[in-house]
Image (cartoon, rainbow, N blue to C red):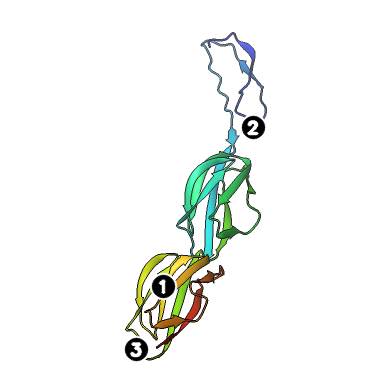
Amino acid sequence: GPYAVGDHTVELTVAANCTVTAPNPRTITIPTGATQQTVATTFTVTCIATEGFIEVTTASSGVNVPFAYDLTIDGSPVGTIGSNQTFTYGPYPIGDRTVELTVAANCTVTAPNPRTVTIPTGATQQTVATTFTVTCIATEGFIEVTTASSGVNVPFAYDLTIDGSPVGTIGPSQTFTYGPYAVGDHTVELTVAANCTVTAPNPRTVTIPTGATQQTVATTFVIGCT
């Protein structure tokens, strides 16, 4: 002011997430008198949240569980989250948000993934929780090699290779486990002395299967020495 004595219209414009106690606009009357008058009016404003947070939990089980997974919210990477962790992201605008967890090839996520989480409006900022349940299967396993030798002049040990790489020696009648190796096919070969023969096949293929636990695949080489 100052404003002339008489009626005046006062209106308060607030943000879309706020409301004003009526009346708005309102009439304010400045009275006449011996002194200039000041007329008071109070606008009571209530605002609700325009954004909130997303709490993501990962719950992983199985074998060969990775250390972390990649996470995106609304298509934008937000970093990694541990395989068994809870972390809060935001703030994000209220409404529907899309959350997606990217896991390793040996892991699966309980649907839906991606999923929609809805941040509601309210008198306070809201945190919406969602949990991704992840199950992982084996990516590797072991090879158990047994030698069974008979005859005479049996050597002290034989050389063994797996996938063409020497892994050391193994006794003539011994069981030893090697690994871990990736799931799938592997070539195992036993090299014996000239006076010994190995029951075929040698080399041979052993297959480590995937599964809920790490698998150990056994193979036996039968050797006869003269």
- Reading the image, the residue beneath label 2 is 21
Secondary element at image label 2: loop
Looking at the picture, tell me which residue is in the foreground, 97 or 64.
64
Residue 167 drawn at (x, y percent): 37, 70
Q: Which mark is residue 208?
A: none
Mark closest to the chain's N terminus, 1 or 2:
2
Q: Nearer the viewer, mark 2 or mark 3?
A: 3
- Relative to the observer, which residue lies in front, 217 or 155? 155
Q: Is residue 125 above or below residue 185?
A: above
- Type of the residue with mark 1: Tyr
SS class of the residue under badge 1? Answer: strand
Lower position in the chain sequence, tag 2 or tag 3: 2
**Left or right: 7, with 162 as reference point:** right
State which quadrant residue 111 falls in: bottom right
Residue drawn at point x = 55 percent, y = 51 percent: 102
Residue carrying label 3: 153
**Distance between the alpha carbons at the discs numbered 1 and 3:** 27 Å
Residue type at mark 2: give it: Thr
Q: Quadrant of the C terminus?
A: bottom left
Q: Position of residue 33 (x, y in %)?
A: 56, 11
**In the figure, is residue 58 to the left or right of 115?**
left
Q: Which residue is mark 1?
A: 178
